[in-house]
Image (tube, helix red, strand yellow):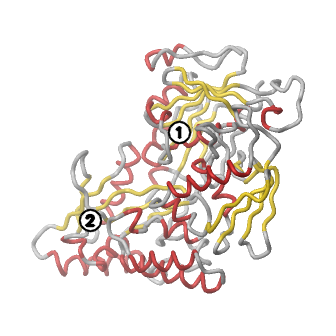
Amino acid sequence: MRLAILAGLGLLGACGASDDGETLQIAFIGEPGDLRDTGLRLSPPAQQLRAATAEGLVSLDAPGEVIPALAERWIVTEDGLSYIFRLRNSDWRDGTPILAEDVRDSLNRTIRALRGTSLGLDLAPVSEVRAMTGRVIEIRLSSPVPDFLQLLAQPELGVLHKGAGAGPMTLERKGAFAQLELLPPEARGLPMRENWRRGTRELTVRALPAEDAVAAFRDGTVELVLGGRLATLPLADVGPLSRGTVRLDAAQGVMGLQVVRPAGLLADPARREALSMALDRETLLAPFNVAGWLSSTRIAPAATAGNAPERWAGLTLEQRQAIARQRIAAVRGSDPATVRVALPPGPGSRLLFGQIAEDWAAIGVTAMLAQEGQAADVEFVDTVARMGGRAWYLNQFACRVRRALCSAEADQLVAAAAAEPDPVARGTMLAEAEERLTALNAFIPLGAPVRWSLVRGDIDGFVDNRWGLHPLSPLAFGAT
């Protein structure tokens, strides 16, 4: 197959997809070095490369649903505490058989290495990984995790053998680009098929700053741009022909402002709450013209927290701002009340800052945008959920993860819930943990994170989904 390889960013406008239609050109929004990240703390582009070349027991398809990967099938016990997987009859890239012992050892290494991260906290209910026979592996949990298979499909849990994964794709690096190609079916333990390459295509992946990625899409150099966020959303308007090319995921997760300097005006939880009360979330993203965005005043969205009510549900915006204004005035005196906000670079951040500054001005607070290198009072948090469930949201603010303003008592409750088999008791613990975090007012929730892509035409293998995640291997099908 012929592949157009670009010598550098200066040649972006000179090349596009190959003439035979067998290469799909993809750009991730990021920095060129992101594609070379290794280890377990991976950039989003590197996560996608890991998932494409080192699948786990299960993986995600284009709509974000769990599908078989190294495991061809599995069963879950009625109590939800045991997952038993049967591995497919396949080999590692070096020709040795894939055995349960290999998978067990790889998963145990990864789980140990993830300690101290939010993903490591999500994996806390895993009590044992054991090889039952050569091709059967069991994972035992201390408490049920409804979305545990979704958790196992995360790129970091891709299984490695001697530093390499089992596919489903091979990767060849060519300068700043990654070339990906599907492995033959027989190399993945599937029946041999003649002419299996028919209907497939290679992928050429690069990482580019947002403006360069959009420019490359506009001039036809790339056909798919992934990894867009709120900060870069205004760049996605590519002109009068853009209708249908900008795709927004109804993503789940957290987006808001984390208090990182609880001093002065922000030393008191009630004044931190005042900043949150003052925000008009219903109009916050009006400048972006994003339909269907879900705002939230909660750490865990209402739907995830058993349809719990939003905060201050009985108060109008004017009433909330009046209360907030009184709290700020009580301590401000004649001194100006200022809060310095750190936001990621991009035109979307400037629009968001304008909305926040206007709402805070209504209560007597001046918002200032922190410049690069300046200390901030609050900083932007924007993370797509790895799995459903209240525990994931609470783990994002654990002391071991954020190390800013946090609640050790809430962490203890979440940890106890991870070891509690009774669902009622577990739910009570998580609700109490959220109450403690909410009372701390260390996080100002805004709503669901925003993720966008640019898609040329109707590319098979691309589907909007709630995880804001678009696996690479499904994109290798559907060549014309």
User: Helix or strand or loop: what does disc 1 sit on?
Assistant: helix
Residue for badge 1: 45
Position of 429 relative to 474 (above/below): below
Relative to residue 209, is residue 158 drawn left or right? right
Rendered residue at 30%/80% (across/down): 270
Query: Residue type at mark 2?
Result: Ala
Please name whichever residue, 203 or 282, is drawn nearer the observer in this view of the structure.
203
Task: Compute the Cα span from label 1 to label 2.
Answer: 38 Å
Provide the secondary structure element on which disc 2 rests: helix
Against 341, residue 404 (above or below) is below
* Residues packed near mark 2 inside 10 Å, few (<14), some (14 to 19) or many (20 plus): some
Quadrant showing the N terminus: top right
* Position of residue 122 in the picture relative to residue 134 (left or right): left
Single out the residue that lies furthest toward the left. 334
Q: Amino acid at mark 1?
A: Pro
Figure quadrant of the C terminus: top right
In the picture of the structure, the residue carrying the numbered disc 2 is 361
Q: Which residue is rendered at x = 52% and y = 33% of the image?
A: 238
- Residue 159, relative to residue 49: is it above or below? below
Sequence-first disc among 1 and 2: 1
Proximity of marks 1 and 2: CB atoms separated by less than 8 Å: no
